[in-house]
Image (tube, rainbow, N blue to C red):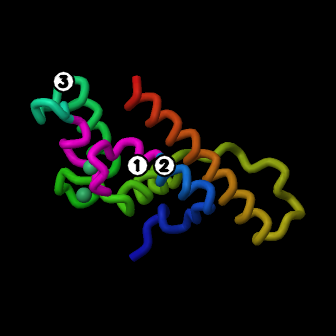
């Protein structure tokens, strides 16, 4: 079964950027985003802001509902966001081959994912 998100191919640059963002969010370095990463290292508790941020992440990325976000879920969530975003009118594609149009769309989808990642980073770090 494929979903629209599966048609989006991430560039190496995009994967590297998402890997860095994931690592930045993974405060305890166990390669999974969990409540721990949003809790105080002193008492292990989440404050309201930390909890809100963590819930926002779970809503966007936790596909299987186990309250943990692994890197493949993180990647998939960004692909799904791009796949579900309405594209602007495709002007200027007359005369291009299907291959060229698909390549252009992949670049545009990757650019969109960079924007989403930036928005997420700002929302989490503010
Ligand atoms: Ca972690
Ligand atoms: Ca999960």
Quarter in which the N terminus is drawn: bottom left
* First to last magenta residue range: 21-38
Q: Badge 1: few (under 14), some or many (20 or more) residues near its Cα, within 10 Å?
A: some
Residue corresponding to mark 2? 20
Q: Residue at x 49, y 63 (%)?
A: 4
Q: Residue at x 40, y 23 (%)?
A: 126
What is the residue that sits farthest to the bottom in this orientation? 1
Q: Badge 2: few (under 14), some or many (20 or more) residues near its Cα, within 10 Å?
A: few
Q: Position of residue 70 (x, y in %)?
A: 31, 58
Relative to residue 36, is residue 124 drawn left or right? right
N-terminal of the two: label 3 or label 2? 2
As helix, strand or loop, the secondary structure at mark 1 comes to helix
- Within 8 Å: ligand 1 and the Cβ of disc 3? no
Q: Quadrant of residue 51?
A: top left
N-terminal of the two: label 3 or label 1? 1
Q: Nearer the viewer, residue 114 or 45?
A: 45
Q: Which mark is residue 23?
A: 1
Q: CA distance from mark 1 to mark 2?
A: 5 Å
Q: Position of residue 26 (x, y in %)?
A: 33, 46
Q: Quadrant of residue 124?
A: top left
Q: CA distance from mark 3 to mark 2?
A: 25 Å
CB atoms of marks 1 and 2 within 8 Å: yes
């Amino acid at each position: 079964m494929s979903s629209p998100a599966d048609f989006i191919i991430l560039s190496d640059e995009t994967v590297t950027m998402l890997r860095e963002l994931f690592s930045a969010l993974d405060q305890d370095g166990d390669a999974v985003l969990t409540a721990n990463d949003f809790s105080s290292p002193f008492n292990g508790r989440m404050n309201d802001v930390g909890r809100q941020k963590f819930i926002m992440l779970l809503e966007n990325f936790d596909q299987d509902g186990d309250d943990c976000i692994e890197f493949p879920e993180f990647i998939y969530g960004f692909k799904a966001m791009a796949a579900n975003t309405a594209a602007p009118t495709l002007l200027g594609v007359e005369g291009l081959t299907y291959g060229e149009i698909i390549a252009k769309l992949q670049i545009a989808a990757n650019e969109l994912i960079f924007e989403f990642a930036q928005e997420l980073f700002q929302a989490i770090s503010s």
